[in-house]
């Protein structure tokens, strides 16, 4: 009886064991590691490009030429374009019309804009559609970033025009 019970238990254990019934599985899993590219644009003297001030010429064209350094790690160069067109707009003025302590914030006067904006880097005009490609040899030294814009008609002294220069830089691999 003991032999029969032992035989039945052995068969039961072997029949429920996953080891005896499982088939080997080969599984290949893709593994990725990306080396991030680091792109930096700074002034040639090492300062940050935070704000730029255009100087007025005699012909009403305001311009700036700034020497910049572009560094890219791990690439063969850099692709550059404008993320959006440069637009210099008259800074709004605000008033406190109700004179009860809380200012009424509203623009006084018509909106005026600079016209004929041009942005070049390394003597190549930047636009919003196509990238300008600069090879690593082109950016090893300081290159000129030039911005020009013509002032609108009927400007008055003291008016301030502001805008954002939106550059898109990507690694050229």
Image: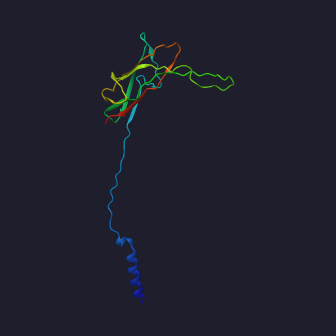
Between residues 105 and 118, which one lies in front from this camera angle?
105
Q: Is residue 75 above or below residue 4?
A: above
**Residue 166: which quarter of the image?**
top left
Q: How is the image coloured?
A: rainbow
Any part of residue 122 in sight: no
Question: Which of 54 and 140 lies nearest the eye of the viewer?
Answer: 54
- In the image, 60 versus 34, the foreground residue is 60
Query: Measured from the top left, where is residue 87 in percent x and y?
Result: 44, 24
> Is residue 165 at all visible to an observer of this figure?
yes
What is the number of callouts on the image? Answer: 0
Q: Position of residue 34 (x, y in %)?
A: 37, 43
Residue 77, placed above or below residue 144? below
Does 32 sit left or right of 113 as displayed?
left
Q: Quadrant of the C terminus?
A: top left
Q: Is residue 16 above or below residue 143?
A: below
Question: Percent from the top left, x then y, of residue 19?
Answer: 37, 71
Residue extending furthest front?
110
Near-viewer residue (23 or 159): 159
What residue appears at the point 34 percent right and 31 percent down from the top-left corner? Answer: 79
Residue furthest right as drawn: 100
Q: Percent position (x, y) of residue 61? A: 42, 14
The quarter of the picture where the N terminus appears is bottom left
Q: Which image quadrant is residue 95 in?
A: top right
Q: Determine the residue positioned at 40% across, 77% down.
A: 13
Which residue is pictured at 36% across the width and 48% down the height? Answer: 32
Outermost residue, bottom side? 1
Asked where in the image residue 92 lies, by quadrant, the reply is: top right
Q: Is residue 14 left or right of residue 104?
A: left
């Amino acid at each position: 009886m003991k032999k029969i019970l032992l035989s039945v238990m052995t068969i039961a254990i072997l029949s429920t064991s996953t080891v005896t019934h499982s088939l080997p599985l080969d599984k290949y899993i893709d593994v990725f590691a990306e080396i991030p590219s680091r792109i930096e644009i700074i002034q040639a003297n090492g300062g940050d490009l935070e704000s730029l001030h255009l100087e007025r010429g005699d012909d009403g064209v305001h311009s700036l030429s700034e020497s910049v350094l572009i560094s890219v790690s791990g690439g063969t160069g850099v692709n550059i374009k404008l993320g959006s067109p440069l637009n210099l707009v008259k800074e709004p003025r605000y008033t406190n019309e109700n004179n009860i302590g809380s200012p009424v914030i509203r623009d006084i006067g018509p909106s005026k804009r600079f016209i004929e904006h041009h942005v070049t880097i390394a003597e190549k005009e930047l636009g919003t559609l196509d990238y300008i490609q600069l090879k690593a040899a082109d950016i090893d030294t300081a290159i000129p970033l030039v911005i020009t814009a013509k002032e609108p008609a009927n400007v008055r002294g003291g008016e301030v025009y502001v805008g954002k220069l939106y550059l898109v830089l990507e690694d050229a691999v």
